[in-house]
Image (spheres, rainbow, N blue to C red):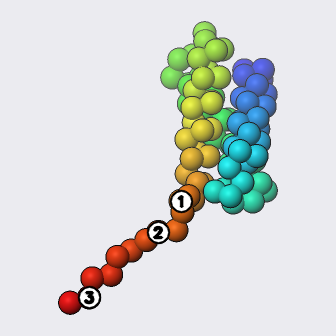
Amino acid sequence: MLLEALSAAILGLALAWAAAHRLPHRLPAPLLVLPTGIAGALFGAFVTHTALGAGGFTLVLLGAATLSAASLSLLLRPAGRLRRSSVTA
């Protein structure tokens, strides 16, 4: 279980680092992005391990990567400015 948690944290850090370097204009400061990726991966590993048991190390890491990516996607800002058309009558 300790190996799963350590692997999930490293995986979450790697995903967050990649997202922070690929999309710096759409994400907040890396000081927020990196811990979010790690926390999402650890929570994903916990949920997957709880659901599946101790049998699937690869599946636990897959669950960690999925929840880490989902939590990082919540930090994304829109790419362009929002355009609102004002209708004047």
N-term-proximal mark, 3 vs 1: 1
What residue do we see at 39% from left, 74% from top? Answer: 84
Q: Residue at x 55, y 41 (%)?
A: 70
In what element is the residue under mark 3? loop
Q: Is mark 2 on a helix, strand or loop?
A: loop
Estimate the x, y position of residue 68 in percent, counting from the top left: 62, 38
Could you tell me which quadrant the N terminus lies in? top right
| Circle 1 SS class | loop
Q: Can you tell which quarter of the image residue 41 is in?
A: top right
Q: Mark 2–mark 1 contact, CB under 8 Å? A: yes
Please tell me how crowded label 1 is: few (under 14), some (14-19), or many (20+) other residues with Cα within 10 Å: few
Say which of 77 and 4 sits in front. 77
Q: What residue is shown with label 3?
A: 88
Check residue 7 in the rendering and tell me which mark sits there, or answer none: none
Q: Return the mark for residue 82.
A: 2
Q: The C terminus lies in which quarter of the figure?
A: bottom left
- Local packing at callout 2 (Cα closer than 10 Å; few below 14, some 14-19, many 20+) is few
Please report the residue visible at 75 percent of the width from the left and 59 percent of the height from the top. 29
Residues under numbered marks 3 and 1 in contact, where contact means CB atoms less than 8 Å apart? no
Front label number (2 vs 3): 3
Q: Which mark is residue 78?
A: 1
**Gap in angstroms between the C-alphas marked 3 and 1:** 26 Å
Of circles 3 and 1, the one toward us is: 3
Q: What residue type is labelled 3?
A: Thr
